[in-house]
Amino acid sequence: MRQPVWFLSHGAPTFLTEPNRTTAFWSALGTALPTDLRAVLCVSAHWESPQPALSGAVRQPAIQHDFYGFPAPLYAQTWPARGDAVIGAWLREELAVRGVPVAAVERPLDHGLWVPFKFMWPAGPPCPVFQLSLSAREDPAWHLRLGVVLTPLRAAGVLIVGSGGITHNLREIDWRAGEGQAATWATAFMTALEQALQRQDVDALCRPWDLPYGRRAHPSLEHYLPFLVALGAAGAQGMTPRHRNWLFGTLALHAYASDASD
């Protein structure tokens, strides 16, 4: 069965001990996703490498607590990931024949992957999970094309997930803002982005700094690039909003997805 594509705004590690509307959405999503998955391939904002690399080709990949200065209980969190060397080799071969050579790297899965996945599959994933790096050398349009390269994997049973932040300006967080409240400038950026998404204006979406308040919403682009990978993998059907939420006034925790089939 052709699998869908998802983009999740993964928020903060504190979600593990401070549940909210978004974590409730993730929990429900885990039970709604297809069960006939061959693998999950995730692109997280928290892994950039000079050239694309793939992790997860071991029996049980480790997870890393790649965050600093948070409460001690967060560093005791675990999640039983699953990997597979044979499927990992197959994924690398599939990408290589489409012009994207990928290095095999035994890197622990970062929190951009395992924090939302722990809510989706608290007892562990139903299939092997792999993580594909962003390329630090490449621009947004390249990451969109990377997603296009991933598209055929969906027909082979691979669920593709981009994990980042549809807005990501930590310097302008408003700790007093209630859940669901958003700053005016952040709302303006999201409105322009979703209008471009609705009309499938991929050129505008590949130039987020040209959208209203784009540089304010994304002082750097690493949390936005997984969205473009997911958008490319969605193909002609595009993606639609499936969840909207705001925390701290400026962090949009929205999720977007394609359907399973065209």
Image (cartoon, rainbow, N blue to C red):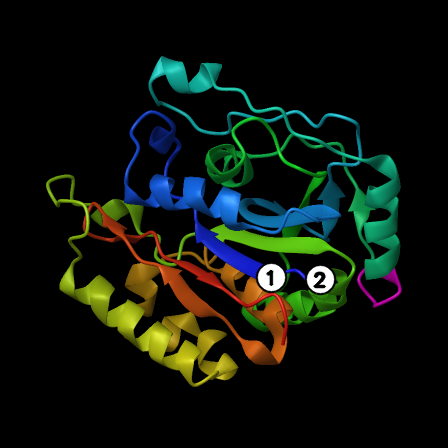
- For mark 1, what is the residue? 4
For residue 154, which numbered disc appears in the image? 2
x then y, percent, for residue 235: 62, 75
Give the amino acid type for the residue marked by disc 1 in the picture: Pro
Percent position (x, y) of residue 207? 45, 75
Quarter of the C terminus within the rendering: bottom right
Query: In the rendering, which numbered label is found on residue 115?
Result: none
Give the dominant element type of the magenta stretch: helix, strand or loop.
Answer: loop
Compared across the picture, whether 159 is left or right of 94 comes to left
Say whether marks 2 and 1 touch (CB < 8 Å): yes
Q: Work out whether 18 lies above or below 47.
A: above
Question: Residue at image x 70%, y 64%?
Answer: 2
State the separation of the CA atoms marked 2 and 1.
7 Å
**Quick one: label 2 or label 1, which is nearer the N terminus?**
1
| Residue range highlighted in magenta | 96-100
Q: Is residue 111 left or right of residue 138?
A: left
Residue 22 visible? The answer is yes
The one nearer the camera, 142 or 118, is 118
Residue 211 visible, this orientation: no
- Secondary structure of the residue carrying numbered label 2: helix
Kind of residue at disc 2: Arg
Residue depicted at x 61% and y 65%: 260
